[in-house]
Structure formats: C-alpha cells, structure tokens
Image (cartoon, coloured by chain):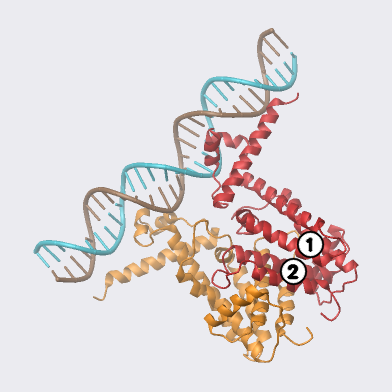
Chain colours: A orange, B red, C brown, D cyan
Amino acid sequence: MAGIRERVRAELTSEIVRLARAQVAADGPGALSLRAIARDLGMASSAIYRYFPSRDHLLTQLLIDSYDRLGDVAEAADAACPRADPMGRWRAVAHAIRGWAVANPSEYALLFGTPVPGYMAPEDTIGPASRYTLVLIGILADQEAAGARYKGPVPAPLAADLTALREFLGVSVSNEALAVGMGAWAALMGAITLELFGHLHNVVDTPGALFDAVVEHHAAVLAGLPGT
Amino acid sequence: MAGIRERVRAELTSEIVRLARAQVAADGPGALSLRAIARDLGMASSAIYRYFPSRDHLLTQLLIDSYDRLGDVAEAADAACPRADPMGRWRAVAHAIRGWAVANPSEYALLFGTPVPGYMAPEDTIGPASRYTLVLIGILADQEAAGARYKGPVPAPLAADLTALREFLGVSVSNEALAVGMGAWAALMGAITLELFGHLHNVVDTPGALFDAVVEHHAAVLAGLPGT
DNA sequence: AGAAAAGCAAGAGCGGTGCTCTCATTTGTG
DNA sequence: CACAAATGAGAGCACCGCTCTTGCTTTTCT
C-alpha cells in the first residue's frame, strides 16, 4: 500500500513535464511534441497517453507551472521590499515580472501570447494565474491604506465589475484604486509584450527602456498623491 | 504580351490568400494548412507551392494584409475627426483599433500574439506595420504643436532611441512627447491583448470597460496640460 | 511556322504530427 | 496463487509541410 507503482508513475509524469518544458523553452509552444518526448524517454509514443490524455492536457500542466513560477518571482520580489514602501515594491515586482519574461520568453508567450484556438483554460489554472496579480493588488491596497487617494471617474459598468472583484478577493481597495491598478497592469503587460514579441525592433534599440518609462509613469500615478 | 497567364496567376494567388485569410479567421493562425487550401481549390497540394514557396511566405502575406487593414481603420477614424481636436482623434483611433481587434481576433492574434518561433518578419512588413503607429504619432505631434507640454524625465538610453526615431520619421515631436506616447501605446495594446486573450475573464465581465478606462486615463495624460 | 524555353498541375513519396486500437506483459492485491 | 488492473509496444489512421519527377500547356524566340 506504499504504492510503489504510484511513485514511479509520479516520477515519470514529472519527467515528461520536465522534457516538455525544455521543449517549449527551446522552440516555443506549438513545438511541443508528444512523440519527441516519448523518443527522449525511449518509450513508445502511445505510452505517453497513459500519463497525459492529450497534448492540451500536458500544455495545461505547463501553463499552471509557468504561472506558478511567475507568481514565485513576483511574490519574492515583493517580499524582499519593506512593506511600508509600496512604490518601491511596485517597481521591484514590475521589474521582476519583466525579468522573468525576458529570461523565459517561451513561457511568457505560453501564458500571455496567442491562446490555443479551441482551448479554454480549465479551472485549475485560475488560481496560479491570479498569484502575480494578487501581489499587485496587495501593493495597491497598502498604498491606499497609507493615505493615497485616486480620483475617478470610473465608468459605471467597470465599477460594478470592480465591486464584485473586491468582494470576491476580500481586499479593501476602492474602485478608483482598482481601476488605476488595472490600467497600470495593462500598461505593464503591454510594454513587455511589445518588447518580447518584437514590435519595438524598428522603433527602439534599448531593451527595457520603454518598460522603465512605463513603470515610472505608473509609479507616479499609483502614488496617488493629491495634485497628480 | 497582355500576359493572360499572368492575370490568371494573379487571380489564383489572391484566391489562395482569400482562402487562407478565411482559414485564419475561422481557426486562428497555426491552423493555416496549404493542403486544405489546395483541397478547397480542387488542385494538388504540391501546386500551391508554385504560388507560395512556403507556408511562412503565405503567412507573411496575411501579416501584411492585416497590418494594412488595421492601418486603414486607424487612418479612417483619424480622418473622420476634426484635425484641431487631437484628443478626440486619440479616442476615436484607439476605439477604432480595439473595434477592429474584437471584430477580427484571429488577425489581431496574428499581428500581436505569439510570434512564429523561427520566423522573422521580412522588410516588407515594417511599412504596413507602421501605419497605425504613424497615425498615433501624428496625433501626438499635433497635440504638442497646439501647445501641450510633456515633462520627463526621459531615461537617457530611451532619449537616444527616440531622437533617432524622430529623425527617421521626420516628424517634429519632443522626446518627452514620444515617451508619453509610447506609454499610451503600450497601455492601449496591453488592454486589448489582455481582453482578447482572455485574461480578464475571471476579473471583469464587461468587455471594453478596462479599455475605456485606459483610453481615458491616457487622454488626460496626452492632453499635456500643465498641472497634470 | 516550328522549335525551344518556361510555367504549371499532378502524383508519389519522405518524415513528421496527434491520437486510437489491440495485444502482450508486468505488477499489485484479494 | 489467481485475478484484475495498470502499463508498454506496435500497427495504423488521418493529417501536415515540403520535394521531386513526370507530363502537359502556354509563351517566346529563331
């Protein structure tokens, strides 16, 4: 009942994931080949399906793992800052996210690039996918708790969504703060995506320059000081 | 010498592109299959290669076409506004871009989603790819010419790039304005990408709400009025 | 006009993919 | 020990991009 078989199964499963991740890292998502993994493992291609019922299921596993790694670096960067300095934390987390993205471009593409056509991310992914955003929201909440005030106007439909979101998360932030934060989030991801997907090649040579400007701009906005 | 053969060749070529676009629109890029196109055309799969030497070449053609369509809608939206109202033009162009994106998600994914692994966009694409950005820069230039002032600081490396960019484009805009504009650009594309690629599904229900907030925020920033 | 050259479509074929099915073997358990 | 479950192997299906050869048609040149 120790389950010797279960153990070797778990090991093989994680070995498959390991090879899959290496494949994705090397040639991007879409280059993921179950047959190639089977070859590397020295087993028949059909045997892989005992561990992952389809290529998409394996891809989902990679998705979850990558979201978790991103969550790790975001949380680590946040934890390394004094909690009383939300703007320093914002800068640190933002740069940590970009750092992870440029270090793992294929994984970033997997998370934030073109979604697989017929593929809808299952429930298991939303937890890991939320981690890095929760870090950002936490910073926002602390900044507001420290006295920052954000002025709207927040469009009515957005306000309703934000209210629901706040209640779901159980965090105490105003709708105005959430709206500002989502704007910063979009700018953050937009800057990284433009950079990583090559849209700055014919515009700007210095990698990260646009990103720095974006982060600094939103640092000022997120500061939420009166008169801004 | 009228070139009857050339004409039928041109027609067949555009027919191939038409079917390819339909395929991409239906099932996203990556579902593009030369064999399927050949089947639809009732010809041998090998015959396609007389018109496009490889799948990537056909994809490049689709890329150029899509960039041109995006450029069309951006320019049209801009032209429909009074030139003397740059902020109105910004709003109009931004919403036009998003409108095109939500109406043609697969084409948007083709342009701004995960790049094809080994694929590097050839020179012919940078012209069409620049059109919608030139519209945005034009608005920025007019706004600054109308008296708007943007304050830095612009990071030194970014400043160098922006100077080169300005000289290349031959537009008269300050580095500060360009930096602010690129920030708005990143936020714009980031908001669209997050929405279209499903990252708002568990956050916000109202499509476009985040986008509106982002556009309005940057409208205020781009206004460039003293005290902002 | 006739011959040479160029363009074109078709078919077979290579190596690759995801995935399914069957069959034999191994392994843990009642 | 015997039985049932889990596992691996192999063949096979339908698809993919791409290449090569083989004929046929159209254009062009002499």
Instruction: Using a 10 Å C-alpha cutoff, classify the residue at mark 1 as few (fewer than 14 neighbours), some (14 to 19) or many (20 or more).
Output: many
* Residue A207 visible from this viewpoint: no
Image quarter in which the C terminus of chain B is found: bottom right
Mark count: 2
Q: Please check whether the numbered discs 2 and 1 fall on a single chain.
A: yes
Residue B108 horizontal side relative to residue A8, left or right: right
Chain on which label 2 sits:
B
Q: Residue at x 62, y 47 (%)?
A: B59
Q: Quadrant of residue B168?
A: bottom right
Q: Quadrant of residue A1?
A: bottom left
- Front-most of A226 and A50? A226
Position of A72 relative to B40 (above/below): below
Residue D15 horizontal side relative to residue B68, left or right: left
- Front-most of B181 and A77? B181
Instruction: Using a 10 Å C-alpha cutoff, classify the residue at mark 2 as few (fewer than 14 neighbours), some (14 to 19) or many (20 or more).
Output: many
Residue extending farthest to the front is A156
The residue at which mark 1 appears reads as B136
Position of A172 relative to A94 (above/below): below
- Front-most of B29 and B60? B29
Mark 2 or 1, nearer chain start:
1
Residue B171 pos. (x, y %): 87, 60
Which residue type does callout 1 highlight? Answer: Leu
Residue B10 pos. (x, y %): 68, 34
- SS under mark 2: helix
- SS under mark 1: helix
Residue A173 pos. (x, y %): 61, 85
Contact check, label 2 and label 1, Cβ < 8 Å:
yes
On residue B184, which mark appears? Answer: 2
